[in-house]
Amino acid sequence: MSYSTAKTVQRLAILFPLLIIYLLFNLSYAVEAEDEKKITNIGAIIDVNSRIGKEQKAAMEIAAENFNNQSDTHELILHFRDSGRDPFLAAYAAKHLIREQKVQVVIGMETWQEAVTVADVVKNLSDQIPVISFAAPTISPPLIQRRWPSLIRMATDGAAQMKCIGDIVNAYNWKRVVVIYEDDGYGGGVGRLALLSETLRNVGSTIELRIVLPRLSEPDTNWDEIKKQLLELSNVNSRAFIVLQSSLPTVTGLFKVARKMGFVGNDSAWIITESIASLLDPHGNYDMEGTLGIKTYYANESSSYAEFQKEFQAKYAEENNSKPGIYALRAYDTINAISQAIEGIPNNTTSTSLQGMITRSLSNYNGLSGKMQLKGGEVPLDSPRFRIINIVGGNTDNELNFWTPGFGFSEDTYRRSDDVGNVTWPGKLRLPASKGWAMPTDEKPMKILLPTYHTNFVRRISGENSNEMGKRGLCSGKKPGENSNEMGTEGTCSYLPFYDGLSIDLFCCVLENLGYRLPHEVHEFNDNNGTYNDMIKLVYNKTYDAVIGDMTVLASRIDKVDFTQPYLESGLSLIVPDESNESTWLFMKPFTWQMWVASCAILIYTMLIIWFLEGPSSPEFDGPLMNQIATATWFSFSSLFFAHREKIYSNLTRVVFIVWLFVVFILNSSYTANLSSMLTIQRLSPNVTDIEMLRTTNSLVGCDNDSFVRDYLENVLQLKNIETVESNLTPNTFSNNTRFSNNTRLSAVFLELPYAEVFMNNYTEGFSNTKATYSFGGFSFAFQKGSPIARNFSKVILDLLENGTMRELQDHWLNPSKCPTNTTSDMPESLTIESFWGIFVISGATSTLCLLSSAILKKFGHQEASGTRPEDSVQVL
């Protein structure tokens, strides 16, 4: 070995230990640096046994692992505690996490009761630890931020979800619903119930029954208490159910019991909120076939979501769930927001700065669940959008249409829809839509009440007296003569073979066009002391389902029952007996007395003017003064008939006379025309012309047995002397032989317009009636409040009104003889001076001017032609 080689080996022997020492030093430094990572402990309080809790746990673990793998300076450690949705267990867990695990953030809490309990505990231990809750109050209490300053609420907008339910109810015209919720022991359903009640009122619906269920544990299969609560449904007809809140064991027991009791079937509808829909496994067996649910929609097209879903499926594979819910996405976004806040904090800082950084991070954070903005301690979604789901065949994620506040239902972003989509209802029905009502069946038919007071509307008959409306083909909405189904072998409606009348025929026409069977049984209401209001009460208290007859729509009744579209207009009509107009002084009636006085005055004035103008020049006015006056009077009167024979010499007299003849022509023509009208018109007039006359004379008036008419006469028209008359009014009611209280006879009778038409059509002479100046809501059928049958009847009645069928029914039953209806018509009025004062002024002014002209001419004639005869000067003119 050479010297140089030995030297090189010697140097390497010296450098090799130094290299080993250097590498070991760097390695120990790296390990020390690793050991100095900033650790943040996060406490998560969830219900680990529920689907929501399992999804949240998996999502938070994925977010923490991703952050820990990417960060060189910070590490998140999650500490999970099970609350079982119990606020006391949640409070105990929070205290343990803070004291033992030294957590710097507390998240979770699926119920608002858990959230406020934990917030109180954290506030007492340390006001520097932020609390992020996955629940929020349905109605935010005042000063919530001041009471719990460190509490941040991340939850779905409860008000928006209630509005979505309200729109579903409105889309299918469910007027009455049943609300069911589980009693959690802390009044958690009260806020949702208040919001839902307000929303339903805004869409014209109401809560008919509220059922509160006890909370059941997982292994508990004793559903006797649920069955006991559901027995209350036998007293109501509403079959639209809304389940506001419930644990999975309770809602599972609810549907199993409801199905056995027949409440999950045809014509029923069930809606569950998001908190319940999110508990259901995608392919679980819950006996919820046809139920509608609500879930918050989120965008799932991004690469970030695809990556998260892949990791989620790997971690959550045992639950056979391929799609994370909104609760999982919110938990994932919460950990990411905390991670973002932690990365912005320098080393050796306090929890106060962490709370501030988390608040700043959540103030504008765009995560998988949507864009979030912290406002007043709450992080709502920027624009909540719900997806309606339909549980079909065990699939709990069958998606229908979207719902967005302010836009309503839509198939996608742009195409608006009227309902939630193609629903499979309970009983596996697709069409028609569920009515949400206990529809009549053969076992439990609809009980119909028939008022038999007015035979033109409802009348009990025998086969030989039946009407021929069925054979005329009107009940299929067709014109007479067209081919239509027969309504009965005797010509009556086959649905009510022992009754006829306008209301009965209309009812049969509606059933023919209704589109579905309506099993029913009828009961007569013929209580002589009963009223129509009594029938309304029987429907209101659910003794009967409907009143088919001549029921008047009134404001006082509309709050108790649902009326159909009115099929006849109604109002108060006044019927009075006529009196003869024969009079000895009928020839004086064409003119009023003022007109007669004015005519005589202008006659006398014209006579004097003619005498003054014509006397000096006419030989016929010569003689004594009395002869001149007699001649002038005769001349004036004979001119009324254009029979004058006297010769006129003065041109001024001719002017006066021409105007006078014009006046005479007008007066004579007017008098003749008015007198002819008075002699030609029927010489009968009502003995009562208006209600004021009845009021001032305190005349006895009659009304039928409907109590509202009597109340209207007393309270509105202020008539006090009132008697009740029989429903089928006859002329004998007005005869002198029929006496009522105080031994007086009726002066008038008030009837509703259709009844008055019947009376006037039967008795065309001797009576007059006024038009209905006091209007009501019309004649209609009455159903129980919230019944969808009323709306279906209304649609058919509108069709019958539009195609003329209703008009023909009305003509057949109310105006069979096509006689014109007598209405109150006074004799032609006497002519007044207001109509003739113009010609009187012209005549008087002309006469006066001629008189003045004559006087002036006479004066100048004497001055210029002295000795000339006065008559010559006039003749010159």
Image (cartoon, rainbow, N blue to C red):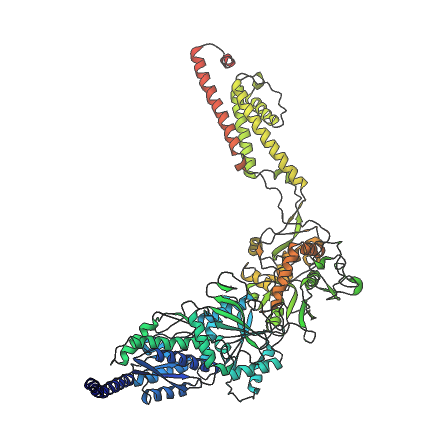
Viewer can see residue 219: yes
Residue 281: x, y in percent?
Answer: 52, 80
Based on the displayed image, in which of its 4 quarters is residue 628 positioned? top right
> Which residue ends up furthest to the front in the rendered image?
2
Residue 735 as seen in the image, left or right of residue 640:
right
Viewer can see residue 726: no
Residue in front for this viewpoint, 111 or 305: 305
Name the residue located 38 percent from the left edge and 80 percent from the top edge: 65
Q: How many marks?
A: 0
Residue 844 as seen in the image, left or right of residue 767:
left
Residue 534: x, y in percent?
Answer: 62, 70
**Is residue 15 shown above or below 494?**
below
Residue 493: x, y in percent?
Answer: 74, 63
Residue in front for this viewpoint, 356 or 834: 356
Residue 546: x, y in percent?
Answer: 64, 69
**Is residue 345 shown above or below 225?**
above
Residue 41 as seen in the image, left or right of residue 317:
left
**Is residue 9 shown above or below 634?**
below
Q: Quadrant of the N terminus?
A: bottom left
Residue in front for this viewpoint, 491 or 449: 491
